[in-house]
Amino acid sequence: MLTQNLPEYWEDLYKAKKDAWWDTGKTSPILEEFFKHPSCPKTGRVLVPGAGRGYDAAAWAARGHETLAVDFSGTAYTALTALSEKQRKLSVLNIDLFELSPKSTEPFDIIYEYCCFNSIHPGRRDEYFEVWDKMLTPNGIVVAAFYPIIRSTSLEGPPHPTSEGELMARLDGVFDMAEKIIPKKSLKDRAGKEEIWILKKAQH
Ligand SMILES: C[S@@+](CC[C@H](N)C(=O)[O-])C[C@H]1O[C@@H](n2cnc3c(N)ncnc32)[C@H](O)[C@@H]1O
């Protein structure tokens, strides 16, 4: 059976045009809002795991950040490659993000998360946080837009829901939440269900 752990699962959704829940065809409004926030870093290399067609990754690059967009779907990669040809600060990797390693790719100052955490099988969430941890510089930050944060008794998805309690439990000892930002410019169906958490490596 195809699960969301496999690129074919995502490829099938792209090919069947079932990408409407995430692909809005433009930069996320909450990212544009975040760019104006005082906590948004002005410099630093950015990693965007599960970048999709890359509107947000390209927006970071257009802002002047060297940006690496990672996605294992062929359709996403083709779109990302086309963007990177126009945007010289954007580069692209067509691999499973769980294969990212600081041995082959320098760690990043910023990891930008939006609709990748909720796409990964919930059983791999700790593993995903380990990827952030190893791919982040010691003083780096994760800009994580978590959606949907809701009270739910089901983990069905994607998008798989999460909750503040789950996040605090999983992040404990790995990342500290430095700041929580409630976006004002969420897409209509995401309003009130998403938060941007700024995470820093836990101080031991
Ligand atoms: C729901 S889409 C979100 C895309 C983008 N972040 C956005 O907000 O528009 C999830 C993307 O993550 C990619 N993806 C899921 N699991 C992945 C993995 N393990 N490695 C690389 N890419 C992955 C999928 O191919 C898909 O393009």
Image (cartoon, rainbow, N blue to C red):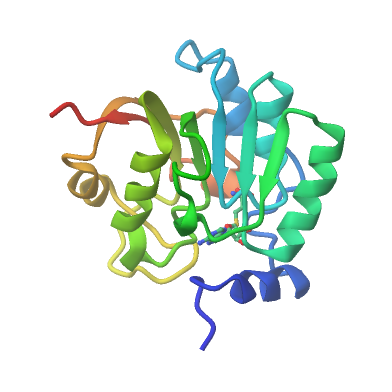
Residue 138 location, quadrant? top left
Residue 19 visible in the snapshot: yes
Taking the image as shown, residue 131 lies to the left or right of residue 119, namely: left
Quadrant containing the C terminus is: top left
Taking the image as shown, residue 90 lies to the left or right of residue 153, namely: right
| Residue 4 position in % (x across, y down) | 51, 71
Residue 196 visible in the snapshot: no
Picture residue at 75% right of the left edge, 75% below the top: 16
| Residue 65 position in % (x across, y down) | 64, 23
Front residue of this view, candidates 93 and 54: 93
Q: Quadrant of ligand 1?
A: bottom right
Picture residue at 61% right of the left edge, 42% below the top: 187
| Residue 189 position in % (x across, y down) | 57, 50
Picture residue at 41% right of the left edge, 67% below the top: 121
Q: Residue furthest bottom?
A: 1
Q: Residue furthest front?
A: 103
Q: Residue furthest left?
A: 204
In this rendering, the answer to whether 114 lies above or below 77 is: above
Residue 10 location, quadrant? bottom right
Taking the image as shown, residue 157 lies to the left or right of residue 62, namely: left
